[in-house]
Image: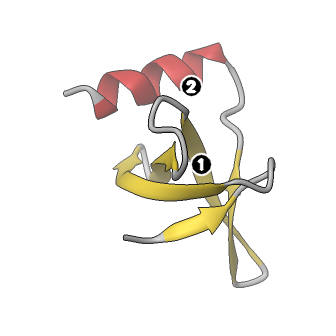
Amino acid sequence: MKAIKLFDDKDYIVVQEKTIDGITYTLFVNADNQNDLCFRKTIIENGEEYYTNLENEDEVKKVLLEFTK
């Protein structure tokens, strides 16, 4: 399993990745608290991969619908 530190300096484990409309989204779970889930969008800048917040409620709804299929 791939684990990374996110914005809050806690370890998160990659649960699943999906590409939706050409954008890769990742579902993470906190390594210490499996009730702590978050989605991040993958962006690539200058050849480096970064995770960023979803932009708005519509994007969150779209991602939730795709991940629950």
| 46 relative to 55, above or below | below
User: Closer to the camera, 41 or 23?
Assistant: 41
Q: Secondary structure at mark 2?
A: helix
Q: Give the residue drawn at x 71%, y 54%.
A: 10
**Crowding near the residue tagged with mark 2, few <14, some 14–19, many ≥20 C-alpha atoms within 10 Å:** few
Q: Give the residue drawn at x 69%, y 21%.
A: 56
Query: Circle 1 sits on which residue?
Result: 41
**Which mark identifies residue 21?**
none
Q: Is residue 10 left or right of residue 15?
A: right
**Which mark identifies residue 59?**
2
User: Closer to the camera, 45 or 64?
Assistant: 64
Q: Give the residue drawn at x 79%, y 56%.
A: 9
Q: Is residue 12 left or right of residue 50?
A: left
**Crowding near the residue tagged with mark 1, few <14, some 14–19, many ≥20 C-alpha atoms within 10 Å:** some
Q: Is residue 14 left or right of residue 40?
A: left
Residues tagged 2 and 1 counted as in contact (Cβ below 8 A) = yes
Locate residue 23, reporting x and y percent. Answer: 50, 51
Locate residue 20, reporting x and y percent. Answer: 39, 43
- Disc 2 residue type (three-letter): Glu
Locate residue 6, reporting x and y percent. Answer: 72, 55
For the N terminus, give its image quadrant: bottom left
| 26 relative to 57, above or below | below
Q: Is residue 25 left or right of residue 11?
A: left
| 24 relative to 38, above or below | below
| Residue 59 lies in quadrant | top right
For the C terminus, give its image quadrant: top left
Q: Secondary structure at mark 1?
A: strand
